Image (tube, rainbow, N blue to C red):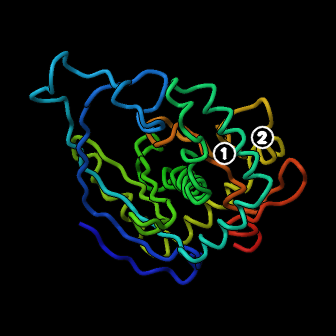
């Protein structure tokens, strides 16, 4: 059950839609497991997946049914498209892309050599949404009644293609096998005046880190192959139960105007923190 919420008068104009997910259900099923590589990074899952049975498909698999609540935010697609075009042409994105190529060639299975690493690198809009999600999870944990490790994310960030329309949204939710995931504390934050204050507070916290300026200016360079930028455990990283990408593809500079290693400022999607 979902409820389309009104936008607060002071909610940032680049957040175009707010939906309260009053009730949701999530099914988790174990189909198999892999080692070293993620299941979806390279198209060789059939050869790498360790199945649950030696012969054929199992008649049943271990599964859980979780219930919870959440908040969905959608960014203005036109603004995201325009911002993304500028980021793709920036030296910062070139550095992230080069680091991803090094990481891909060093850490993935033999069949990865046949895959173009750039086709597996999430677009800048994904980095933007992922960074915003982590900032909001940290802020919501202080107001929702749920611990940060109890909140999870689902990112919907991709460009338009013949197969699907463009998307720029994120879902922050909590699910549990009992009633603890449906206490209402998260949905309550979707109320217009509360949400607009929460977003501003989250962005302001994301503008600074106790490890700055080292964190704010962190950019991978050869031979480094880490897959994040201005992000660390002090400011942006989330627990393993919360993050869908193991704290990769996060960079605070995509949110706000922060300095880079060269001293230049990247155009953050939400602009300057002073203008919030």
Determine the residue located farthest toward the front in the rendered image.
Answer: 114
Between 224 and 264, the residue placed more toward the observer is 224
On screen, residue 176 above or below 2: above
Q: Quadrant of the N terminus?
A: bottom left
**How far from the left and from the top, in percent, is residue 205?**
67, 55
Left or right: where 68 falls relative to 97: left
| Quarter of the image where one finds residue 189 | bottom left
Which residue lies at the image location 42% right of the left edge and 69% below the top edge?
165
Q: Which mark is residue 235?
A: 1
How many numbered marks, from 0 up? 2
**How far from the left and from the top, in percent, is residue 177?**
23, 40
**How far from the left and from the top, in percent, is residue 193?**
49, 75
Q: Are marks 1 and 2 in contact (CB under 8 Å)?
A: yes
Earlier residue among tags 1 and 2: 2
Which residue lies at the image location 28% right of the left edge and 43% below the top edge?
176
The residue tagged with tag 1: helix, strand or loop? Answer: loop
- Between the C-alphas of marks 1 and 2, the distance is 8 Å
Which residue lies at the image location 74% right of the left edge and 66% below the top edge?
273
| Quarter of the image where one finds residue 71 | bottom left
Number of residues whose C-alpha sits closer than 10 Å to that of mark 2, classed few (under 14), some (14–19) or many (20 or more): some
Determine the residue located farthest toward the left in the rendered image.
Answer: 59
Identify the residue under disc 2.
211
Left or right: where 219 falls relative to 137: right
Determine the residue located farthest toward the right in the rendered image.
Answer: 263
The residue tagged with tag 2: helix, strand or loop? Answer: loop
Number of residues whose C-alpha sits closer than 10 Å to that of mark 1, classed few (under 14), some (14–19) or many (20 or more): many
**How far from the left and from the top, in percent, is residue 75?**
52, 70
């Amino acid at each position: 059950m979902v409820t389309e919420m009104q936008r607060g008068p002071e909610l940032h104009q680049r957040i175009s839609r707010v939906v309260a997910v009053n009730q949701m259900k999530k099914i988790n099923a174990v189909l198999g497991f892999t080692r070293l590589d993620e299941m979806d990074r390279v198209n060789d899952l059939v050869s790498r997946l360790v199945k649950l049975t030696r012969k054929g498909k199992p008649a049943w698999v271990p599964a859980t049914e979780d219930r919870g609540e959440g908040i969905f935010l959608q960014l203005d697609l036109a603004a995201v498209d325009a911002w993304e075009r500028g980021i793709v042409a920036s030296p910062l994105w070139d550095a992230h892309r080069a680091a991803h190529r090094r990481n891909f060639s060093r850490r993935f299975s033999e069949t990865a050599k046949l895959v173009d690493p750039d086709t597996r690198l999430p677009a800048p809009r994904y980095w933007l949404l992922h960074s915003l999600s982590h900032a909001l999870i940290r802020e919501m944990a202080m107001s929702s009644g749920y611990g940060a490790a109890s909140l999870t994310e689902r990112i919907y960030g991709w460009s338009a293609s013949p197969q699907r329309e463009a998307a720029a949204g994120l879902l922050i939710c909590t699910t549990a096998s009992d009633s603890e995931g449906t206490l209402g504390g998260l949905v309550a934050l979707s109320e217009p005046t509360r949400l607009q204050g929460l977003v501003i507070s989250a962005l302001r916290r994301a503008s600074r880190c106790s490890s700055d300026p080292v964190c704010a200016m962190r950019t991978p360079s050869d031979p480094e192959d880490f897959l994040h930028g201005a992000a660390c455990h002090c400011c942006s990283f989330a627990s393993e139960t919360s993050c869908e990408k193991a704290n990769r593809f996060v960079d605070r500079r995509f949110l706000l105007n922060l300095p880079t290693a060269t001293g230049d400022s990247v155009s953050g999607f939400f602009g300057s923190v002073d203008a919030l």
